[in-house]
Amino acid sequence: MKTKIYTDFSENKAAGKKSFAVLIDPDKIEGESSCMRIVNMSIENQVDYFLVGGSLITGNNFGHVVRLIKENTDIPVIIFPGSSMHIEPAADGILFLSLISGRNPDLLIGQHVVAAPVLKRSKLEVLPTGYLLINSGQQTTVSYMSNTTPIPHDKPSVAACTAIAGEMLGLKLIYMDAGSGAGSPVSSQMINMVRKAVDVPLIVGGGINNAHKAARAYESGADVIVIGNGIEENPSLLVEVAELTSRYNQQLNV
Ligand code: 1GP
């Protein structure tokens, strides 16, 4: 069983090193050239990971996008699945998401049963992940599609207890997501409380659309931040956040 991505996550967390993941939603890619533009910028700016996926993928280019990225870079490609249909063997790993903020059995264990035999046969690194949706003020695609109630943004203790339960169940990562294009990202207070509550690496995403919000997520305790929409709207954000991540990590060596 492959463990490289998880080993990197845990070693970086132990060293206080931050990582930056660029989310590519295949539905939002307009042709190979627009995908390659983000891929090339990510290579130049030493992005740490690609996440590929979305809660609703309507087109049929998911596999094509994963393979295109893999053919052009060694940056690890991790599937961020919206359902058990989103499996592409060419990727390096998959976030095996259990939506523990919700009470929809299909997303807690149902889809996983369908995906498990396929993943078992694949060479993908499976990353068991406790996925927490946080209310950002408006309904997001993922909260609608998952038919679950997100954790209220001003209830950090609910998020912390949910994360603790996930860790106790053996989940290896916690991903707090305000939802793609969220009006406001997960609050510093909530990230901070969850950070203190669990030892596993913490991924934070949703609504991080400027470098200031990215810095706040890192300072509050996120080990990995994920940005999708913000880069689609303003590609120079990729450069800014990559520089921020690098500055943050250089301080560790001082
Ligand atoms: C969404 O966390 C990801 O699930 C990224 O969100 O597209 O808002 O950056 P954004």
Image: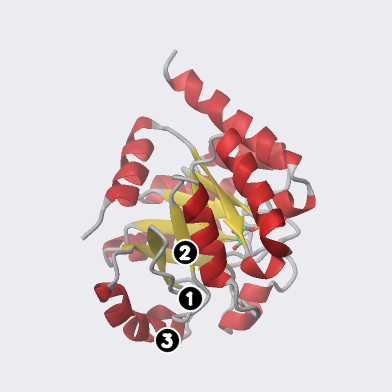
Label 3 sits on residue: 105
Amino acid tagged 1: His
Residue at left offset 35%, top offset 86%: 114
Screen quadrant of the N terminus? bottom left
The quarter of the displayed image where residue 152 is located: bottom right
Q: Secondary structure at mark 3?
A: helix
Residue 74 horizontal/vertical position (percent): 44, 45
Q: CA distance from mark 1 to mark 2?
A: 8 Å
Graded by Cα atoms within 10 Å as few (under 14), some (14 to 19) or many (20 or more), the crowding at tag 3 reads few
Camera-side residue: 89 or 134? 89
Camera-side residue: 89 or 208? 89
Q: Secondary structure at mark 1?
A: loop
Q: Residue furthest top?
A: 254
Question: Can I make out residue 26 in this image?
Answer: yes
Seen in the picture, residue 23 relative to 116 is either above or below; the reply is: above
Q: CA distance from mark 1 to mark 3?
A: 18 Å
Q: Which of the four quarters of the rendered structure image does ligand 1 lie in? A: bottom right
Label 1 sits on residue: 86
Amino acid tagged 2: Ile
Graded by Cα atoms within 10 Å as few (under 14), some (14 to 19) or many (20 or more), the crowding at tag 2 reads many
Label 2 sits on residue: 79
Q: Secondary structure at mark 2?
A: strand
